Every structure is written in structure tokens, then in C-alpha cells.
Image (cartoon, rainbow, N blue to C red):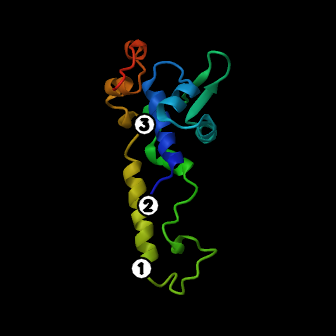
Amino acid sequence: MRLTKQSNYAVRILMYCASNDSLSKISDIAEFYDISETFLFKILQILNASGFVETVRGRHGGIKLKREAKDIGLGEVIRATEDNFDMAECFDLESNTCPLIGTCGFNHALYRALNAFFDVLDEYTIADLTDNRRNIRVLLELDSAVRSAPKRVEA
């Protein structure tokens, strides 16, 4: 199974917000992760509708976590941001053409695998992913000393 960029960026956005002590600027997030603001807004709509983030409008606006990072489960985020989890034709009961549906063990094995996947993801929260907050803040350039330091230019 492979997650979409939407899920990948959604988790990154939540980690960014969890590591930031103030409102996170949409332009800063887009620039840091090198994604378009349009795509970021699409993801933010899902995160907002799912209750993970809230937006603050205005000149000094931005986004922040709506709940504590420890209360946002990784599995919950992935379920909200992925369109489907059809790992094989067996999962799509409406368009399935396999004559063995319901009689072979493949469908059952795939469902067990998918449930195991989510069981593991459900063990983690956004707080767990940002456990090394100090280093993450440096990498995200959220500390004022890092932000104000001149960028190193490679020759």
C-alpha cells in the first residue's frame, strides 16, 4: 500500500503546527515543504473539516492545531486524507469481476493486512512524531536564531 502525497503532506503540516509555538503561516509551510499553496489549501480544508486544525484569518493569521498533538492519532489522519484503501479488486464490491470473490482467502488476508496497518498507525500520535521537538524546530527553521541567520550558499 502506498499513501498519497496528500496524506504525506497532511502529516507534515500537522507536525509543523505541533512544533510551532505560534500560528503557522501558510506561505511558510508551502515554502518549507516546496508545495503549492493551492495544494496546501486543499489539504487544509480536509484537516479543518476533520477537526485537526483551525484557521485564524487576518493579517497576522495562520493555522494551528485545534486539538493537542497527543490527541491527534496518525491512523485518524490517514483515514481522513486518503480517498480509499482498495488494495485489490476484491475491495471494490461494486465493480469486482473476480469469480472467486467470497470463496478465496485472498480478500480475507488483505483485510487483515489493512487492519494490521491501521492498528500500528493507531498506536502513534502527532506528538509521538514530534517527540524530538527541539531538532524538528531547528530543521523547520522555527527558532528565531535559525530564521535570522544568513543562508549558507554552496559554491
For this orientation, the residue located farthest to the bottom is: 99
Image marks 2 and 3: residues in contact by CB distance under 8 Å: no
Q: Quadrant of residue 51?
A: top right
Q: Is residue 68 visible?
A: no
What is the spatial separation of the Cα atoms under label 2 and label 3, in whole angstroms? 21 Å
Q: Specify the quadrant that holds the N terminus.
A: bottom left
Compared with 57, 74 (above or below) is below
Please identify, in this view, whether the residue under mark 2 or under mark 3 is nearer the observer.
2
Q: Residue at x 47, y 40 (%)?
A: 11
At which x and y percent is residue 16?
Answer: 46, 30
Image marks 1 and 2: residues in contact by CB distance under 8 Å: no
Q: Residue at x 58, y 55 (%)?
A: 83
At which x and y percent is residue 84?
Answer: 56, 59
Q: Is residue 59 visible?
A: yes
Amino acid of disc 2? Met
Judge from the rendering whether residue 125 lies leftward or rightward of residue 53; answer left or right: left
Compared with 57, 89 (above or below) is below
Q: Earlier in the sequence, mark 2 or mark 3?
A: 2
Camera-nearest residue between 74 and 45: 45
**Would you name the residue on which mark 1 appears?**
105
**Would you name the residue on which mark 2 appears?**
1
User: Mark 3: few, some, or many residues within 10 Å (few <14, many ≥20)?
Assistant: many
At which x and y percent is residue 9?
Answer: 50, 41
**How many marks are shown on the rendered structure?**
3
Camera-nearest residue between 19 and 120: 19
Amino acid of disc 1? Gly
What is the spatial separation of the Cα atoms under label 1 and label 2, in whole angstroms? 19 Å
**Would you name the residue on which mark 3 appears?**
126
Amino acid of disc 3? Ile
Judge from the rendering whether residue 84 lies leftward or rightward of residue 130; answer left or right: right
At which x and y percent is residue 85?
Answer: 52, 61
Q: Quadrant of residue 132?
A: top left
